[in-house]
Image (cartoon, grey):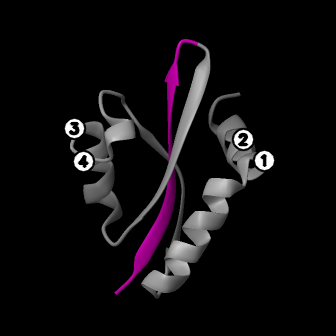
Amino acid sequence: MNYFVYLIITKNKQKITSYVGYTNNLNERLKKHNTSKGAKFTRGRKWILAYSKKYVSKTIALKEEYKLKKNFKLRNKIKSYIYK
């Protein structure tokens, strides 16, 4: 089974907010975030997919998710590509 690490972003006024997660079904997960059935932090906002990467094991995906969550420099770089 494949797992995905993803970064979704939303823009409120001038602030860009991001959220990092992992899933085995990327389309369903994004749908849940946008219908307020995803993580509590993501409820009530319109999210767009900014980044995703596929992994073959859950263990590797979880490790990479953790790294991306802590790497704010990379997250800001990805955000700047979407909202210039």
Are there few (<14), some (14-19), or many (20+) residues within 10 Å of tag 3?
A: some
Label 4, residues with CA under 10 Å away: few <14, some 14-19, many ≥20: some
Q: Residue at x 33, y 47 (%)?
A: 39
Residue at screen point 30% across, 56% down: 29
Earlier sequence position, callout 2 versus callout 3: 3
The N terminus lies in which quarter of the figure? bottom left
Q: Secondary structure at mark 4?
A: helix
Label 2 to label 4: alpha-carbon separation: 24 Å
Bounds of the magenta span? 1-13
Q: Are marks 4 and 1 in contact (CB under 8 Å)?
A: no
Q: Name the quadrant containing residue 76.
A: top right
Main SS of residues in magenta: strand
Residue with the mark numbered 1: 73
Question: Contact, CB < 8 Å: mark 2 with mark 3?
Answer: no
In this figure, which residue is indicated by the disc labeled 3?
Answer: 35
Decide if residue 24 is on the left or right side of residue 9.
Answer: left
Task: Pick whichever of labels 2 and 4 is earlier in the sequence.
Answer: 4
| Whether label 1 touches label 2, CB < 8 Å | yes
Picture residue at 46% right of the left edge, 87% below the top: 57
Measure how far apart labels 3 and 4 are at the Cα level: 5 Å
Is the Cβ of the residue at disc 3 closer than 8 Å to that at disc 4? yes
Cα distance, mark 1 to mark 2? Answer: 5 Å
Q: Which residue is mark 4?
A: 32
Label 2 crowd (10 A; few <14 / some 14-19 / many >=20): few
User: What's the distance in space between the residues labelled 4 and 1, CA to CA?
Assistant: 27 Å
Residue 24: image tag: none
39 is higher (above) or lower (below) than 35 = below
Which quarter of the image is occupied by the C terminus? Answer: top right
Question: Which label number is shown at residue 76?
Answer: 2
Q: Separation of disc 2 and disc 3 at Cα?
A: 25 Å
